[in-house]
Image (cartoon, rainbow, N blue to C red):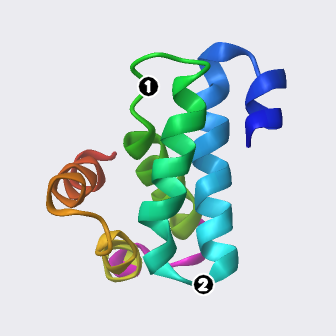
Amino acid sequence: MFGLSLITPPPTVPAAAGALVVWTMLELQDTGALPVLLTNAEHIVGQFVRGADLLKEVVQRLVTTIRQVTPPELVASVVLPMLAGLDAEAHTQAVGYFLTMP
């Protein structure tokens, strides 16, 4: 991720990192990996973009990806369990981001 962030224009680093976190989580098929992936990604992204909200980027990318392959009425039943491994504060924020997405 560091190399990707190094060659990505700074304004798009959070989006690229968020997409990589989602892709990795889906590839691992392990929702418990999200907290570790997010923590590491936040550390790396923070070196390139100060104040980036990586959690929001991850939720947006996750929902966008799931919507491509899941009927609309089932998106919440797929996405919300994937966010369950986050600590209470991050989980509350993530669910808020999910609920306010268009």
* Magenta segment includes 69: yes
**Residue 96 seen in the figure:** yes
Q: What amino acid is found at the position of numbered circle 1 in the picture?
A: Ala
Q: Residue at x 29, y 55 (%)?
A: 98
Identify the residue at horizontal 60%, vertical 84% (top origin): 29
Within 10 angstroms of label 1, few (less than 14), some, or many (20 or more) residues? some
Residue 53 x, y percent position in the rendering: 39, 32
Identify the residue position indicated by label 1 in the image. Answer: 52
Q: Are marks 2 and 1 in contact (CB under 8 Å)?
A: no
Q: What secondary structure is marked by label 2? A: loop
Q: CA distance from mark 2 to mark 1?
A: 26 Å
Q: Which residues are magenta?
A: 68-74
Residue at (57, 31) in percent of width and height: 45
Q: Up-down: is 94 above or below 33?
A: above
> 29 or 37: which is nearer to us?
37
The residue that mark 2 highlights is 29
Query: In the image, what residue occupies the spot 39% across and 20% down?
Result: 51
* Quadrant of the image occupied by residue 26: bottom right
Q: Quadrant of residue 102?
A: top left
Indicate the position of residue 15 as horizontal and vertical percent values: 59, 35
